[in-house]
Image (spheres, coloured by chain):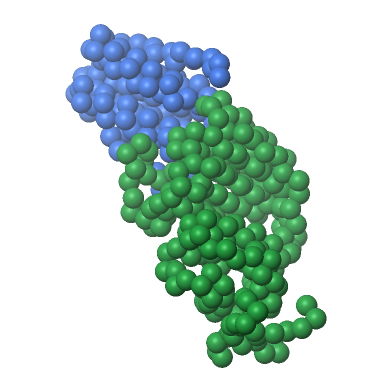
């Protein structure tokens, strides 16, 4: 980052400026809302469309800002979302331009109020468990229980983690027929924790907001699998949209 | 995709049924269990069902729903149910998740469970 700029060029002739209230100055920090506004504005310009917020949300930008603003995750989410939007909107725009814009917005992301520590999470190599049949749920669940015990979780919290894994694996099996559950040991500022990453290429969850608000009752369950899982964990985020699979991330720290 | 199908034992004790669930239930096993219990209730004319979960290490919303369903179906047939042997870790997990059992009481041990079922039925063995 040799040059701080408030201008982002999408094409040779056009350039887009950050609105005045978002311009970077020495010592300023950005709230989540401001970061979102900056990124949304940038992408709207790059893609040359006036996308509604919902489409941007479904491209993963919402998850990016709301749940995990670490730079690495932000970049990969933006690129994923960008590819998705590109296909849907038939736009030809060079992803490299996008990346350049990301770097120029680096200050925005890294200066989110009170969120700097999220860049300091160390993640160990993970173990991935394929979920394709009933037995796989038990395998993933037992592995989670063992891992939790190994890193020092109490029996209760280990059970909570195993239950969360079981819920997520069962959802994968039921709705997507197959997917993966990955378990990682993570360290953040001296705290040790376990991270669950459950992904599938299934039909996605169109009414995820309704489900997470606790007002939804599913036909096949008690309606509390997803939100129940959220309550068991310290951090929880879902990235999903209709036809684009589902990616669930959950973290629990040892107390 | 071979799975070993477990048969969950259903034991009759005077006019009560005791079901001991071992480990965790697969989808198919859960459905089989519901069928088995309801058939046994019909054949034996039991008026109380005790579900022993002391060998169940972990309960997710699916298993909780299965137990709820069994209790509700048994009730429709005239039989009340009590859960016995819940491990503390499960109790904490259930409360944290917000899962609740309706139509299903809990008891700390078998004696209490039988008492609960016996009392409210009005059938007195003394």
Give the percent coordinates (x, y) of residue A221.
37, 38
Left or right relative to A83: residue B72: left
Q: Residue at x 57, y 72 (%)?
A: A46
Q: How many marks?
A: 0
- Residue extending furthest right? A2
Q: Residue at x 51, y 60 (%)?
A: A90
Asked if residue B73 is positioned above or below residue A64 in the image, the reply reads: above
- Residue extending furthest top? B43
The front one of A64 and B22 is A64
Give the percent coordinates (x, y) of residue A86.
54, 60
Asked if residue A255 is positioned above or below residue B112 in the image, the reply reads: below
Give the percent coordinates (x, y) of residue A175.
45, 38
Q: Residue at x 53, y 63 (%)?
A: A91
The front one of A104 and A109 is A104
The answer to which quarter of the image holds residue A105 is bottom right
Q: Which chain is blue?
A: B
Left or right relative to A45: residue A110: right
For the question of whether residue A7 can be seen, the reply is yes
The answer to which quarter of the image holds residue A35 is bottom right
The answer to which quarter of the image holds residue B78 is top left
Q: Residue at x 72, y 44 (%)?
A: A126
Give the percent coordinates (x, y) of residue B83.
38, 29
For the C terminus of chain B, which image quadrant? top left
The front one of A208 and B111 is A208
For the question of whether residue A112 can be seen, the reply is no
For the N terminus of chain B, which image quadrant? top right
Q: Which chain is green?
A: A
């Amino acid at each position: 980052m040799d040059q701080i700029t408030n201008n982002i060029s999408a094409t040779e002739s056009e350039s887009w400026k950050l609105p005045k209230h978002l311009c970077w100055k020495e010592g300023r920090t950005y709230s989540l809302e401001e970061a979102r506004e900056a990124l949304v504005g940038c992408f709207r310009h790059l893609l040359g469309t006036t996308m509604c917020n919902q489409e941007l949300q479904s491209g993963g930008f919402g998850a990016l800002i709301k749940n995990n603003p670490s730079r690495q995750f932000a970049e990969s989410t933006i690129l994923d979302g960008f590819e998705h939007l590109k296909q849907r909107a038939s736009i030809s725009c060079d992803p490299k331009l996008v990346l350049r814009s990301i770097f120029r917005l680096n200050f925005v992301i890294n200066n989110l109020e009170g969120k700097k520590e999220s860049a300091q999470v160390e993640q160990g190599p993970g173990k991935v468990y394929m979920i394709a049949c009933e037995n796989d749920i038990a395998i993933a669940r037992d592995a989670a229980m063992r891992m939790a015990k190994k890193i020092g979780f109490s029996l209760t919290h280990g059970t909570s983690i195993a239950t969360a894994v079981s819920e997520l694996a069962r959802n994968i099996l039921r709705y997507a027929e197959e997917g993966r559950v990955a378990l990682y040991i993570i360290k953040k500022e001296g705290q040790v924790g376990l991270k669950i990453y459950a992904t599938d290429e299934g039909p996605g969850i169109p009414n995820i907001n309704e489900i997470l608000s606790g007002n939804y009752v599913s036909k096949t369950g008690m309606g509390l699998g997803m939100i129940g899982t959220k309550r068991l964990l310290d951090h929880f985020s879902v990235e999903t949209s209709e036809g684009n699979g589902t990616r669930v991330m959950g973290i629990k720290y040892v107390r | 995709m071979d799975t070993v199908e477990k048969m969950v034992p259903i034991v009759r004790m005077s006019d009560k049924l005791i079901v001991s669930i071992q480990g965790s239930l697969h989808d198919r096993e859960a459905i089989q269990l519901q069928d088995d219990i309801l058939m046994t209730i019909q054949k034996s004319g039991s008026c109380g069902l005790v579900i022993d979960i002391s060998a169940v290490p972990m309960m997710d919303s699916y298993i909780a729903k299965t137990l709820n369903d069994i209790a509700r179906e048994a009730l429709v047939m005239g039989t009340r149910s009590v859960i016995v042997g819940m491990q503390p870790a499960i109790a904490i997990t259930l409360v944290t998740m917000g899962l609740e059992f309706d139509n299903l009481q809990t008891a700390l041990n078998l004696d209490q469970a039988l008492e609960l079922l016996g009392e409210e039925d009005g059938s007195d063995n003394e």
